[in-house]
Image (cartoon, grey):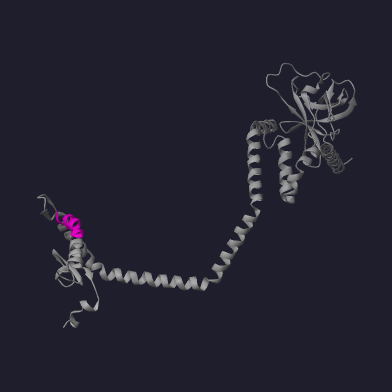
Amino acid sequence: MNGKTLRSLVYLVAFTLVTGFLTYVLAVTITNGSVGSTASYQAHFTDTTGLLPGDDVRIAGVRIGQVKKVKLVDDCQPHEDTSGTVTRSCSLVTFGVEKSIPLASNVQVDVLYRNLVGQRYLDVQEQPDPATMLSPKAILPLTQTRPALDLTVLFDGFRPLFQGLNSQDTNDLAYEIVASLQGEGGNLDSLLSNTASLSTSIASQDSQIGSLIDNLNGVLATVDSRDSDLTDLIDQLQRLTTGLAGDRDEIASSLGNVDSLATSTTQLLATIRPYLPTDLTQLSGVANTLATSTAVNTQGVRTNQLDQFLTTFPTKISSLTRTASYGGFFNFYLCRVNVSVAGATNPLTGAPLTVALQNNNAAVCDSSSAS
């Protein structure tokens, strides 16, 4: 055998070995097999629906083995099934774990959902303070295992919610539920605990909720008894809005007139504004004069002249009226009464300020017609 033939034979053997190894690795990956030696363990479950040989065994999401066998046995501890019937039948699951990862005797093994298709896997949860290692001949009791949640029952409970969601929202919600069941979206025990706490709180407020519902029923009954009044009110509001809509042109015109009035008022205020300070000053002077002017009355007491005038004026007028009416000594006709305020001047003319208290426009008062 020459060198060229020997070299070809070496290449062929190396190619065969590499191809065979890769084929073996591919076959192990497809079948979820293990390339290392494993130790077998067993556990009792009340329900292993959907769990099949070859499914994964995981710790903290890392694959450490696979399920080998699932069978029905009758030597379990008594337990209640979903219908409430006490039975001793259960599933015995045999699973393999890599020997490099020994299991403690107090581990918790749960059946979890791997995906929405329905594939399951065994989730091994290590507990604190492990006492001893689990013997391959030992069988984990029902107290250390949990079956998978029945998604059919779960989704049936969510059916009223799903009816109000579109397909994308339903898919997102389903993904979150499965993620929660897999331990990737929060602690399921905490979720159930919080839900129970919420239900307890709502139940403790049962009387208040009942009172609220009774009050609402009373309100609805009152509204129902006033149905005709409510109808009349709605009709009147409708007529009001219809009338306002019909008068929109007049309302628009009125708004224009209001705008014109506001403009005129603004112009008026702008015209009299320069005289306001003077008028206010003069008014202040008048008020001060009226407040400070005093005189001695008939009793010899000094009083304010304005108070004295307002007090005696009605009496004097009555005396004059009786004298003119009954005595016949003289006749008079009151045409006008003007009052001049000392010290006050007209801001426009500068003349003394005179206030007309009486101005009669009768013919007898017209000085131009007097003979």
Q: Quadrant of residue 126?
A: top right
- Quadrant where the image shows the N terminus: top right
- Quadrant where the image shows the C terminus: bottom left
Q: In this orientation, which residue lies closer to the viewer: 335 or 131?
A: 335
Q: Is residue 16 magenta?
A: no
Q: Position of residue 368 (x, y in %)?
A: 18, 82
Q: Quadrant of residue 90?
A: top right
Q: In this orientation, which residue lies closer to the viewer: 284 or 52?
A: 284
The residue drawn where x is 69% and y is 30% is: 189
- Quick check: can you spot residue 214? yes
The residue drawn where x is 15% and y is 58% is: 289
* Image height of 87 relative to 308, above or below: above
Q: Main secondary structure of the magenta part?
A: helix
The residue drawn where x is 74% and y is 23% is: 107
The residue drawn where x is 62% and y is 55% is: 229
Magenta residues (range): 304-315
